[in-house]
Image (cartoon, rainbow, N blue to C red):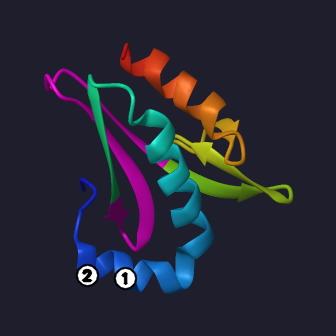
């Protein structure tokens, strides 16, 4: 099922997943200079994710945020961790490279 975007859901998610949402908001800021992609916070079965799409519609990526061994990490849906959540510039660079943005 594709992630859903709804502001009313984000209000509910904030109370449970506030730390994840803060990391996603920071990552959105880091991605904002890439005009080729759009990144929105969405809901995926009760968990916030960052849904990233190329504006030309050629590709998309869903990024999650998982707690692993004492720290938060950005991860792909298959749970592959690719950057510490506290390293938003590094995560943004990896995403831009993957999305060719």
Find residue 91 and report its horizontal and vertical position in percent. 60, 33
Residue 28 sits above or below residue 53 on the image = below
Asked if the residues shown at circle 2 and circle 1 are in contact, with their CB atoms under 8 angstroms apart, the answer is yes
The one nearer the camera, 66 or 39, is 39
Q: Label 2's element?
A: helix
Residue in the picture at 18% in, 21% down: 58
Find residue 65 and report its horizontal and vertical position in percent. 58, 54
Residue 84 sits above or below residue 9 on the image = above
Tell me the residue that label 2 is attached to.
8
Is residue 61 in the magenta section? yes
Residue 76 sits above or below residue 34 on the image = below
Q: Report if residue 44 is visible in the image.
A: yes
Q: How many marks?
A: 2
Give residue 3's mark: none
Find residue 101 and report its horizontal and vertical position in percent. 36, 17
Badge 1: residue crowd in 10 Å (few <14, some 14–19, many ≥20): few
Q: Range of the magenta residues?
A: 42-63
Find residue 17 and report its horizontal and vertical position in percent. 55, 75
Give residue 11's mark: 1
Residue in the picture at 37% in, 82% down: 11
Q: Residue 55: which quarter of the image?
A: top left
Q: Label 1's element?
A: helix
Residue in the picture at 54% in, 51% down: 26
Residue in the picture at 71% in, 59% down: 67
Badge 2: residue crowd in 10 Å (few <14, some 14–19, many ≥20): few
Is residue 56 in the magenta section? yes
Residue 34 sits above or below residue 45 on the image = above
């Amino acid at each position: 099922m594709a992630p859903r975007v709804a502001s009313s859901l984000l209000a509910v998610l904030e109370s449970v997943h506030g730390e994840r949402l803060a990391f996603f908001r920071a990552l959105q800021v880091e991605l904002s200079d890439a005009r080729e992609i759009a990144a929105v916070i969405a809901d995926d079965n009760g968990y916030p994710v960052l849904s990233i799409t190329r504006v030309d519609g050629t590709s998309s990526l869903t990024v999650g945020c998982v707690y692993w061994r004492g720290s938060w990490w950005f991860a792909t849906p298959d749970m592959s961790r690719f950057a510490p959540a506290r390293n938003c510039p590094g995560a943004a660079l990896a995403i831009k490279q993957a999305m060719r943005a």
